Image (cartoon, rainbow, N blue to C red):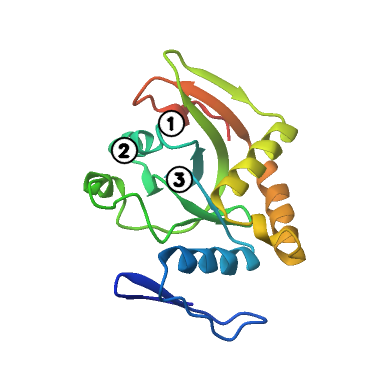
Amino acid sequence: MRITLSRGYPRVRAVDDKLVEMTYGDSFTKGLLWLHHLLLSRGMFFLHSAAISVDGKGFLFLGPSGSGKTTLARAAKRLGATVLSDEKILVKGGVVYPAFFTSGRKGYEHVNKVFSQRKRPLNINCITWIGKGRDVKIRRLPRHEALSKLMNSILNTNPIAELRSNYRILSNIAEEMDTLSRIPSYYAEYPKHYPVWRHLSV
């Protein structure tokens, strides 16, 4: 897969099972939609999540914008963790990959400071949905609740509404959800800058 920019818009050139080449040059949105489709067909999914590595263990922290993902990533970096992303990551087969773009757009240059120089894929050992709170509250999620939250996270991050009849993509989603739902999952509320990852059993 190759992505190039033309007049500020991406051109995506890819080879897939049924598609030899497809190019979008007139719309940033169309280019991203096609990239999402390509990744989904290959079993890879975006998640709106921060990702850090501590002692070789991978932690995902999911939540909507404003929930504290970037703040957590910056705190983790200061305490010696490796940060893969503060905003969006790719997952496949229980492995997390740094996403190809971050929240370091214009006006957010400071966010780039949280990223480590070496970003390598790593196994996911813990998944946590986060929220802000005055006190620390951590709750282990039963598998059925983790499945529900994972489905919402996948649907909210990947434009797949028009692909309901695509059996391969639906099969990939089901397989990934089964894999991720077997990983220890939590819901956590905590004060700003609290090192919540130190209190998660993996």
Q: In this view, does 168 lie to the left or right of 83?
A: right
Q: Residues within 10 Å of mark 1 (few under 14, many from 20)?
A: some
Residue highlighted by disc 1: 67
**The quadrant where residue 181 appears:** top right
Q: Regarding mark 1 in the picture, which secondary structure is present there?
A: loop
Whether tag 2 and tag 3 are in contact, CB under 8 A, the answer is no
> Label 2 vs label 3: CA separation?
11 Å
Whether tag 2 and tag 1 are in contact, CB under 8 A, the answer is no
Q: Nearer the viewer, residue 125 or 107?
A: 107
Give amino acid for label 2: Arg
Q: Is residue 128 above or below residue 6?
A: above
Q: Residues within 10 Å of mark 3 (few under 14, many from 20)?
A: many
Question: Residue 161: horizontal and vertical position, in percent?
Answer: 65, 54
Q: Residue furthest bottom?
A: 20
Question: Going 66% across and 28% down the picture, which residue do you hit?
Answer: 141
Q: Quadrant of the C terminus?
A: top right
- Any part of residue 148 in sight: yes
Residue highlighted by disc 3: 51
> Label 2 vs label 1: CA separation?
14 Å
Q: Which mark is residue 74?
A: 2
